[in-house]
Amino acid sequence: MKSKPVIVIGAGLSGLCCARLLLKYNIDVLVLDAQDDVGGRVRTDHVDGFLLDRGFQVLQTAYPEAKAQLDYDSLRLQSFDPGALIRTQGRMVEMSDPWRKPSKLLSTAFNGIGTFRDRLKLAKLRWHVTHTSVDELWREPESTTLEYLRRTCGLSDDMVNRFFRPWFSGVFLEKNLSTSSGFFRFLFQIFALGDASLPEQGMSAIPRQLAAELTADMLRLSTSVDSLSTSVDSRSTSDDSMVDRHHVRLRNGESIDCRAIVLAVEGREASRLTSGMIHSPEFRATTCFYFAAPQAPFAEPLLVLNGDNEGPINNLCVVSNVARSYAPAGHALISASVVGKEFMDSSDLNNTVRQQLRQWFGSQVDAWSLLRRYDIPIALPAQQAGFRESLSGQSRLGDGLYYCGDYCETASIQGAMVSGRKAAENIISDLASQR
Ligand SMILES: Cc1cc2nc3c(=O)[nH]c(=O)nc-3n(C[C@H](O)[C@H](O)[C@H](O)COP(=O)(O)OP(=O)(O)OC[C@H]3O[C@@H](n4cnc5c(N)ncnc54)[C@H](O)[C@@H]3O)c2cc1C
């Protein structure tokens, strides 16, 4: 007889990584997700021949966990050039990474952003993060990213405000750079060592690859979990083992027994399902606009940063310059991202974004048509300076109840994947010790 499964609630990256490892150890799993497809926050919509990721996002090829778990070749990754174009004072200037693009050394050195001393300090920071282990980077004194850049690295306000602020506002989804300096150091290392990339078939190719080994009976989509119970079931027969007494109740009233439960849902939902045993993190929000254009406004596969910090757009990208497959032939796909909650669902934002695009690229913008706008209120858990001290480092909440998700590690693809793996390792070891 088939044993009761371990139920994984959530088919985002953390839940899929967890389920995949359990399967490898021949542990029966059942993955449940409220959405109609796998991926959680990593989904791609197909609209009129365009691929629209739900919010601008990229895979960093140097993420250690992604390298270990994903088959990059079959994702056919398309990479951004290192560095960025900075829109400032009415023009676009390039800030490249001269270590990886030596031909850009001079244009970057004289781009008018920051001072010569900043260049030396940037070189020192780059050397530091690329010659220090990740563990050591996390052990260094913790502060906000802003304090770290200003005080510890000694970078000028000009360099911070025109380059680092828009760059990392787009990563942390907050403009004050109050996010942990440890997380910044880790990410800076990752940016220096690898590429920002997009799978040829959209970001959803990542969760699809992780879910490939789940058969139809192991995955139930459009299935929302209402509550769970890990209390002793009075109807249990005497030969039920201790691990057989859990069940989840679905929104449709159905109840499913299982040997263990993994909560692989966002922190807020994890908090609801555990009646507050898991503390709900604060969330960062973003809005992303996708436009179809008859032609790209520039040719480079580079991110554009708003170096003036005026207007709603924080960063922009001609996605089809990076991955041609994101737009049908004869069209370009442009994404413009806005950071923060203040504009969430505001209809005025459509006009102000278009006005800003017109300032940047002129009248060609009139021919751009809005394909879709994504308002994402729960995009990333906030991870302020010192956040690691409040992480338990545990994935076991109680007997037979486990949890994982980006909020348990770092707010990233890397963090979600690590936390899913750790939860599975915990379950595997607990089940082995019960034999
Ligand atoms: C716009 C945006 C841009 C991003 N950019 C990047 C980037 O460039 N690089 C990077 O590294 N990271 C990025 N991230 C972060 C990264 O995508 C997330 O950290 C990661 O995907 C989180 O995975 P998760 O498994 O922890 O959670 P989720 O993906 O949120 O998965 C949770 C799943 O649980 C399901 N669920 C919730 N409640 C229930 C319930 N009651 N019953 C059943 N199912 C339920 C949800 O439907 C969801 O599928 C970005 C995120 C967003 C939103």
Image (spheres, helix red, strand yellow):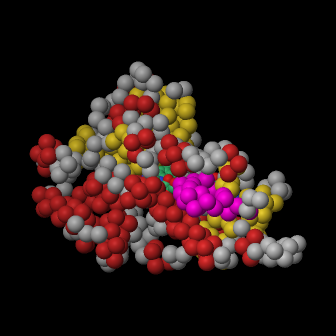
- For the C terminus, the quadrant is bottom right
**Residue at the spot 47% in from the left edge and 36% down from the top edge:** 201
Image coordinates of residue 221 in percent, x first then y, are 69, 47
Q: Which residues are magenta?
A: 4-29
Q: Tell whether 143 sits left or right of 393.
A: left
> Residue 362: which quarter of the image?
top left
Q: Tell whether 159 sits left or right of 234.
A: left
Residue 78 lies within the magenta run: no
Residue 150 appears in the rendering: no
> Residue 21: which quarter of the image?
bottom right
Please determine whether, in this image, residue 344 is positioned above or below residue 177.
above
Give 103 or 65, whichever is nearer the viewer: 65
* Farthest residue, direction right: 235
Give 223 or 105, whichever is nearer the viewer: 223
Image coordinates of residue 235 in percent, x first then y, are 88, 72
Image coordinates of residue 374 in percent, x first then y, are 55, 43
Please determine whether, in this image, residue 394 is positioned above or below residue 252.
below
**Residue at the spot 40% in from the left edge and 63% down from the top edge:** 176
**Total numbered circles:** 0
Please determine whether, in this image, residue 178 is positioned above or below residue 45.
below
**Residue at the spot 54% in from the left edge and 68% down from the top edge:** 425
Residue 189 appears in the rendering: yes
- For the N terminus, the quadrant is bottom right
**Residue at the spot 67% in from the left edge and 59% down from the top edge:** 28
Residue 27 lies within the magenta run: yes
Image coordinates of residue 260 in percent, x first then y, are 69, 68
